Amino acid sequence: MSFDAPTLDAWLAHLEQLHPNAIDMGLERVARVRDAMGLRPDFPLIVVGGTNGKGSTCTMLSAIYRAAGFKVGTYTSPHMLRYNERVAIDLVPAADEQIVAALRAVEAARADVSLTYFEFGTLAAMRQFIDAGVEVAILEVGLGGRLDAVNVFDADVSAVVTVDLDHQSYLGDTRELIGLEKAGIFRAGRPAFCADAEPPASLLAHARQIGADLQCIGTDFGFRNETTQWRWWGRDGQKPGLPFPALRGTYQLANASVAIAMVQALHERLPVGIGAIKRGLLEAELAGRYQVLPGRPSVVLDVAHNPHAARGFAANLLNQGYFETTHAVFAMMADKDIAGVVELVKDRIDHWHLAPLDMARAASPEALAELIVAAQARGRIHFHPDIASAYGAALRACGENDRIAAFGSTYTVAAVLAARAR
């Protein structure tokens, strides 16, 4: 007998215990359920993968298409505070009732096929997009690309934003191995993009082998920073006088560039004017990507959880301006390169406020402290029972000219946002 429940919380609890592994790479099971559900989208699909930057790119794409008047479906992960954030139609998170109805449809179709939490959610998201009649869907890869559940749907346009070390136990321990996994979202004869300035040879070779129309940043498209504005260039010409994205950070120009390149690739099916591109860049919002909250002291939130992201985070801290003291609220997963992250940000932090995250994968504050000490970081270390307490202590210690930087994981940022909402 299939599961049923009236509330989204009950369904999510069911999904969490449904499959023996949280991650089970492969497409055969999810493809069987896709076919049983008859999920055959007739609208353009944009699939975005990468180590970092894919969430920002999806957000800008969604904002641009919405500004152009198209009905847009967006599927991203993980969520910050509510599961509903993962599925948006016209930038509005789906209602509980919509998600529950789609989850019921997946449950009814799967029979004896075991699905992971993410696989279940991916199929449910597509069910919602088809039912809502969206005109374009933007799908963020969860992990890797080749064997990710999102890849069960054929992309009309795809992009790998960046390639760096993360999730090595699943994807491999070199950029070449990881690049090959991420290139699995490319499709023969269709536009594909790479916004990594140094694309792995494996990614380039795979695109050639399958006959994808690959375009790379710096060669086929790119950007030029012109101080008060910026210019995009590509195969079809240039777009000067663009506003800087509302999403902060110098790396966002690369994300914006690949977003515009994908919009251009679909221009015949989904025509978008320069006005919509400008509006989309200015209106795109995404929590936890160098998010600077209003008020004083300055509070910065960043989900930076690997060295590649931490490098950009550290540069943004430096470029944000002068602050007398920076307090870090810091927690990470134990399976991440904590030492690599600490090494990149250690000279920007004066006080480290460490606390445990309420999950088995999280590194203990004591383990974090050992790595901070080993890196010879100059900041003082403070221990707290939870992230809310750590944030509260940092806030009490700050003057108007100080700064709080909460980073290291989506869960760290989410816990600070939850604490501020109380």
Image (cartoon, rainbow, N blue to C red):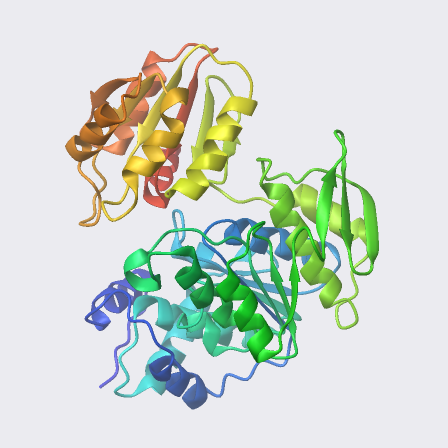
Position of 407 with respect to 261 (left or right) is left
Position of 140 with respect to 279 (left or right) is left
Residue 326 visible in the picture: yes
* Up-down relation of residue 352 to residue 89 (above or below): above
**Residue 311: percent from the left, percent from the top?**
46, 36
101 or 376, which is in the foreground? 376
> From the image, which quarter does the N terminus lie in?
bottom left
Q: Residue at x 49, y 17 (%)?
A: 296
157 or 411, which is in the foreground? 157
* Up-down relation of residue 244 to residue 398 (above or below): below
- The image quarter in which residue 413 lies: top left
Q: Residue at x 25, y 49 (%)?
A: 335
Residue 139 visible in the picture: no
Q: Residue at x 31, y 16 (%)?
A: 378
- The image quarter in which residue 354 lies: top left
**Residue 279: percent from the left, percent from the top?**
74, 46
**Residue 382: percent from the left, percent from the top?**
22, 20
**Residue 29: percent from the left, percent from the top?**
34, 82
* Up-down relation of residue 12 to residue 328 (above or below): below
Q: Residue at x 28, y 19 (%)?
A: 393
> From the image, which quarter does the C terminus lie in?
top left
Q: How many marks?
A: 0
Position of 66 with respect to 417 (left or right) is right
